[in-house]
Amino acid sequence: MNIIIVGNGQVGSALAAALGEHSITHWKNDLDLLTVEELKKVMPDAVINAAGKTDLKWCEENAREAFRSNVEAPVKLYQRILSLGTPIRFLHCSSGCIWDGPYDEHGMPFTPTHPARPAAYYSWTKAACDLLLLNENPSMAAILRPRQVYSASPTPRNTLTKIRTYPKLIQTPNSMSSLDIIIKTIRHCLHSPSDWNGIWNIYDVGVTTPFHIGELLARAGLRSMPQAFTKSELDSFHKPKRVDTVLYDERFERLIKPEPLEEVLVRTIDRYSAALK
Ligand SMILES: NC(=O)c1ccc[n+]([C@@H]2O[C@H](COP(=O)([O-])OP(=O)(O)OC[C@H]3O[C@@H](n4cnc5c(N)ncnc54)[C@H](OP(=O)(O)O)[C@@H]3O)[C@@H](O)[C@H]2O)c1
């Protein structure tokens, strides 16, 4: 397949490296510069959008640019793709953080059909873009919603790297998504003849807490044992507010068959540790 991957951050660069069985054009310029003419040069079978402004504080302080990059530019790109009139799949990286949980008002995890409940401007941009893409044409778009992405690569955006730096950690349940499960879901969305579009919550099965990940990292010698503190203590100084979210998606679990989170975490921390040596 001919695939354009947009975005050169944690997810975009990992996808470009992982999907080597395809002919990949890795688009590292602005989304707006991926014009109809540029699209025609590649005539892709799929475009994966992993570009976006992801720093929550930066998004609050630069709301216009955050809106342009996270909402306006992806929607306009999708419009250009649709205007070509050929069946090009658009896979868009959204986020599980459109729901401020960890659970809904009935104590249940968030499913793809739950209305968004954003707590930060960044989350509003992600939720707005999803709705606008689906409103444009739901049949050629897959909306991918991972949560707290982690991998064996010791890069600054990796959730494992971030958790190594905080001395105190909360004990609130959360979903997490390994890069491996994101890649597995993307492969499905690229190859499935029919059941690929619409919204996908993406996660390794089960819940964990930042505190428990801190413990696992400490046992691997990658940090000191964390101290526990409460979510309200964190909320008293952490602005914008940290979002906690637990995800569920029946279709995702049936078709993608994700592995248990604790097993994937332990295995990934082993590889992360080896990569540091
Ligand atoms: N990492 C996570 O835990 C996580 C969780 C849920 C969802 N996601 C979503 O997954 C996607 C990828 O995340 P990531 O972790 O790879 O983030 P990342 O490491 O911050 O990478 C995003 C990349 O997009 C670029 N970008 C920003 N605006 C752009 C524009 N207008 N045109 C072209 N490129 C632009 C950024 O460049 P600059 O740095 O120069 O702005 C950055 O290189 C994002 O949409 C994010 O919302 C991530």
Image (tube, helix red, strand yellow):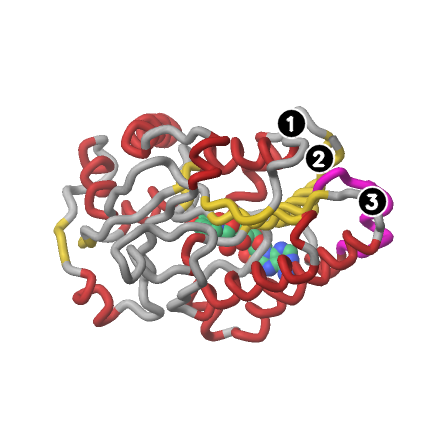
Residue 63: percent from left, percent from top: 52, 74
Question: Which tag is nearer the camera, tag 3 or tag 1?
Answer: 3
Is residue 87 rendered to the left or right of residue 258? right
Amino acid type of disc 2? Ile
Choose the circle earlier in sequence order: 2 or 3: 2
For mark 2, what is the residue?
A: 24
Q: CA distance from mark 3 to mark 1?
A: 24 Å
Choose the circle earlier in sequence order: 3 or 1: 1
Q: Residues within 10 Å of mark 1 (few under 14, many from 20)?
A: few
Q: Nearer the viewer, residue 259 or 214?
A: 259
Residue found 70% across the figure and 28% down from its top: 22
Residue found 69% across the figure and 54% down from its top: 29
Q: CA distance from mark 2 to mark 3?
A: 19 Å
Q: Is residue 188 above or below residue 48?
A: above
User: From which residue to which does the magenta span run?
Assistant: 34-46
For mark 1, what is the residue?
A: 20
Helix, strand or loop at mark 2? strand
Question: Which tag is nearer the camera, tag 2 or tag 3?
Answer: 3
